Image (tube, rainbow, N blue to C red):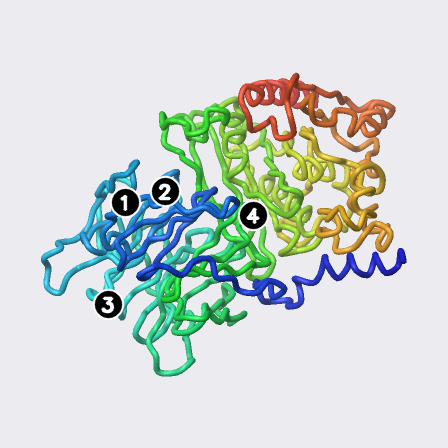
Amino acid sequence: MKRFVCILLTLVCTGNLASATSPVDRTSPLATVRTDFALADGPSWDGFSLYVPDVKGERLFRYFPTKEQWQTVLGDAGRISASFYNHGKLFLSDNGAAHIAFLAGKQKTRIAGQDPNATPPARPNDLVVDSRGGIYYTLTRQNQVIYIDPDGQQTVALDNVTTPNGITLSPDERTLYVAAYAPKEIWAYPIPTAGRPAAGKRFAVMDDGPAKGADGMTIDRAGNVYCAGATDVWIWNPSGKLLDKIACPTRPINCTFGDRDMRSLYITGFGGLYRQRMIVSGRSPHPPSAPGEPVKNKNQPSTAIPNDITAKLDIPYARYGDRQVLLDLFTQRQRSGPQPALVIVHGGGWKNGDKTKFRALAVALAQRGYVTAAIEYRLADEAAFPAGIHDCNAAVRYLRANAATYQIDPDRIGAVGGSAGGHLVGLMASGWQTPELQGTGGHADQSSQLQAAVVMAGPLQMTQGSVAERSRDPKADSNANRWLRKTIDQAPELYRLADAHLKISAKTPPILFLCGELDDPPRNQASRDKLKHLGIDTGIKIYPDAKHGCWNQLPWFRLVVDDAVSFFQTQFETN
């Protein structure tokens, strides 16, 4: 019986990885979400809900998947052909009014656009918003792509593109992809400067017959490119290799990623709205960043980037073939010399999450005198352990290799992680000498050694305690089993490799543990005892009335920042 359960768990954990190349979860069939649209067009996800414009019905809807509830945002929206959510705003391609707008409450606020009386009419089709707040949009009849800079000034970014329709940006924003509708081609344009693409090349062709149809586009976090065609959504890797096609019951029009784990591809089409579960997740929108912008949730810290902080977003720090892994870097504008650096590692059970989730923490620590790097890493469904820890260690090596560029003191690099990110930080700290944990992401000549680490409610033990118990429980739906692809009884050596506690040695740096009172403060007592026995500085801060995740909640957020800063200051001065 035990052997049968282990086999079953293995099938459950690996079943959605039948293809080594396709990002589509073929264990989950395409689902119809809603059909009563006149014509559903370019959708977008805001972190909690999906916006769907009904271009012919002239309405704008909002869908809350967890509650399966719909809301009519605008009953007289006009002909909105596409939407895009970024920086806390919903941007709209208002095809009928011939301009680009954003939604402020129940009002569309014009940003810039075209003359609605031009001949032929110059009506925006699709759009994408970059990390600076700049907007690219397509004018299909004019064969142009227009760019609106963050100050609202617009210029022609591309001319003589044959019927441009869908548009998207690579994750590092160094490539602009444009779908040429009539010839069914995808074109890729390098972007040396925002708003000024260089000469492009044909990236891919939809060779499925005479019907027109290179329509709306999106991209996932691995850089795979998606485009709605005449009958399917096509998917190519960053090199232009066709990975898969998602057949739709009716002609697809556009698509975007959504749901809390960003692993649902929402497809709009002539028949309504569809949802396909994916292996690789989409990219989360950047949170609000404008200084002084009000916080929507008063229990959460602000993600605004103050004027005294410089932000460099979506920097590639590791590469594995076509797959780039990105970080967001925050530094003080005025610095007197090299500063210590901190790698910020988000949580999410090794299978969910995004670097933007720790934006507030990264900015707050940057204001206190650190160069902070909030990193993404490959999640469980995309890549099994040890891929995620390879990325984390590659981030440390990247910062050391670029210490002069970013004014970093290479001898003072620490890390902060929460929940699963806390485990990864603990493994970075104790396993920096383990070759199997280093990977090939780049800068192999540099060390991944940390000088100090802060673990926020992350389990260091994998072979004992709650992680091991859940791994053996067939009803637990263990995140570790999903990440490591096996149970602890199937692969004890793999779990030992992932165990940060077992690797604690005299060469492990000081580690501070932070935990809410209502979480599990004794969780890492064995690791603290081991560190103390070896003479390594450690300790725990427990926050009254706080639950798991308190590091992203007020009032505890400020205490977390203060305690982390005090710890790093002490350790960096000592070392």
- Residue type at mark 1 is Asp
Disc 3 or 4, which lies upstream in sequence?
3
Query: Residue 3 in the image: x percent, y percent?
Result: 88, 59
Residue 132: give its label: 2
Callout 4, which amino acid? Asp
Q: Are marks 1 and 2 in contact (CB under 8 Å)?
A: yes
Query: Residue 540, position in %: x, y?
Result: 73, 21
Report helix, strand or loop for mark 1: loop
Q: Which of marks 1 and 3 is nearer the N terminus?
A: 1
Q: Is residue 157 visible?
A: no
Which residue in the structure is indicated by mark 3? 160
Nearest to the eye among marks 4 and 2: give it.
Answer: 4
Say few, some or many: other residues with alpha carbon within 10 Å of mark 4 (under 14 / 14 to 19 / 20 or more).
some
**Camera-side residue: 69 or 449?**
69
- In this rendering, the answer to whether 575 lies above or below 399 is above
Crowd band around label 3 with a 10 angstrom C-alpha radius: few (<14), some (14–19), many (20+): few
- Tag shown at residue 261: 4
Q: What residue type is labelled 3?
A: Asn
In the displayed structure, 233 sits above or below 532; it is below
State the residue at coordinates (63%, 52%): 441
What is the C-alpha distance between the residues marked 1 and 2?
8 Å
Quarter-of-image position of residue 231: bottom left
Q: Where is residue 510 in the image (x, y as percent from the top left)?
A: 74, 26
